[in-house]
Image (spheres, coloured by chain):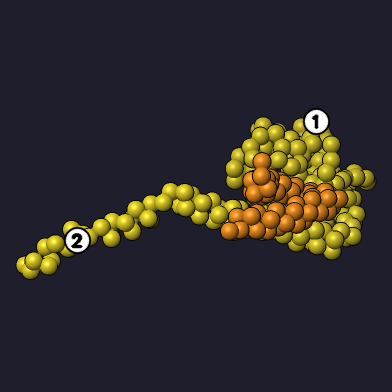
Chain colours: A yellow, B orange
Amino acid sequence: MSEDKKNKNHPDNDQDMMKLVDNLNRKEDVNLNRRAFLKASFGTTVALGLATTPFGVMSAIGNDKEDAERIEIATADELAVGEAKNFNYPTEDEPAVLVRTPDDQYVAYNNKCTHLQCPVFYEHKDNVLLCPCHKGYFDVNSGHPIAGPPQRELPKILLEVKDGKVFAVGREYRHG
Amino acid sequence: MDKKRVTFLSIFLFLAINVISLSKVIEGYYGQEYSHVYIFMIVALISTGLATIAFFLWRKEEYKR
Ligand code: FES
């Protein structure tokens, strides 16, 4: 082995050592990190702020469509007390559930869970609406969440029972 | 507190405001409460504008020699 190689890890002058110490200038290091951190935070602030605009635009566009259509969804004797049935309202791709509650009332809600849109089912045994995805529970009588992750109530479908038939006549997003 | 510090900290305040506004906007949109959508969208845009001003003020101070 040559003399040269053996000494490779031993600096022959102080110059290299000085450079290392330079590198460890703590004040500079902290400052530069702080700058990068603030820039990233600022970028996030702008991104989040601008992310609100598409919702504003979509609301402005979709605001005026009314869904007060009247549709027959069941005959009154079709469901026994404590039974439920699925239907679509107001459009074909908005699933909903009609329930005849144990105290013989008809209630209906759009059954897309307000957490992450899984379908919600009626659980006869416990008399609740249950979302199996993350164990979200909704009150059958009001559509409001009672347990689990959902925070918002299910959209309520307004019903009318007439001449032995159940009609859906409208929808309320926020209720009770 | 000097100007640099105030602008620095205010960016985090605006970040917090935007996080909350965005969540309110989304809630309002899916709950079809359009007035909430507009109010919080405006709040978010104003706070974004202020954050931009604060950022440039901070940058001027920070890189001043
Ligand atoms: S999707 Fe219903 S609880 Fe998560």
Residue in view at x 90 percent, y 44 percent: A161
Q: Is residue A121 left or right of residue B29?
A: left
Residue ID at (75%, 61%): A54
Amino acid tagged 2? Asp
Res. A12 mark: 2
Helix, strand or loop at label 2? It is loop
For residue A103, which numbered disc appears in the image? 1
Q: Is residue A60 placed above or below A144 in the rendered structure?
A: below
Q: Mark 1 and mark 2: span between their CA atoms?
A: 93 Å
Name the quarter where the N terminus of chain B is drawn. top right
Left or right, residue A109 beside residue A149: right
Q: Residue at x 8, y 66 (%)?
A: A3
Instruction: Tell me the quarter of the image containing the C terminus of chain B.
Output: bottom right
Figure check: A134 above or below A3 = above
| The quarter of the displayed image where residue A129 is located | top right
Q: Nearer the viewer, residue B6 or A62?
A: B6
The disc placed on residue A2 is none
In the image, A109 versus A29, the foreground residue is A29
Q: Position of residue A144 (x, y in %)?
A: 75, 37
Residue found 89% across the figure and 60% down from its top:
A64
